[in-house]
Image (cartoon, rainbow, N blue to C red):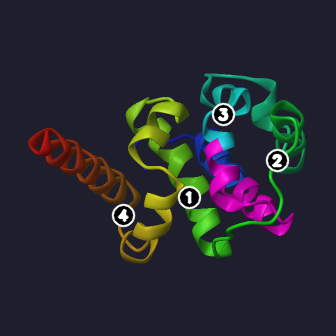
Amino acid sequence: MKNFNLQKRQLCDIQGRLFELALKNGYDCPAFIKTFMNSHSAIALDDTYDRLQWAGEEYILEELNEESGGLKKAGETYSIEVMYWAGYLYRYWHYYTNESSKEIYKIADAKTVNECWLGFHTLDIEMAIDDLKELYMQKQEEKALSL
């Protein structure tokens, strides 16, 4: 974690715990991740400073549930390890590249992160992010060639 202050490391952890909490509360994991990454709550966490950053994962989940008009229950679930890693990864990614949560989700959606977890979760997190970005670029090149 180059140049990551305590606040940024804590926010990575809070977001990881938020994703775990969504699983524990029985929310559909891919739907939760998509909703969160495209939400005002994620924008608040992306900001330099917002009160929501220090509200804790329970409060953020309540805010997101209210913002979305009710998060989808049941459905597809991921392991608790995948959920924590995904939440941590996405927040770290924002600090590493300064891309918004919405931009990050376009590059690596919930399905991609779940599929890559087994091979990527043991990598240095910056390497995992770089590899996910590379996978996205390869997919974009393949799409362009098939047109």
First in sequence: mark 3 or mark 4?
3
Residue ID at (43%, 29%): 98
Gap between marks 1 and 3 measured at Cα? 14 Å
- Inspect the magenta stretch and tell me whether residue 56 lies in it: no
Gap between marks 2 and 3 measured at Cα? 15 Å
Q: Secondary structure at mark 1?
A: helix
Circle on res. 124 = 4
First in sequence: mark 2 or mark 1?
2
Query: 40 or 123, which is in the foreground?
Result: 40
Residue 127, position in %: x, y? 30, 57
Q: Secondary structure at mark 4?
A: loop
First in sequence: mark 1 or mark 3?
3
Identify residue for label 2.
71
- Inspect the magenta stretch and tell me whether residue 33 lies in it: yes
Circle on res. 86 = 1
Query: 147 or 86, which is in the foreground?
Result: 147
Residue 143, position in %: x, y? 20, 44
Query: 100 or 145, which is in the foreground?
Result: 145
Circle on res. 42 = 3
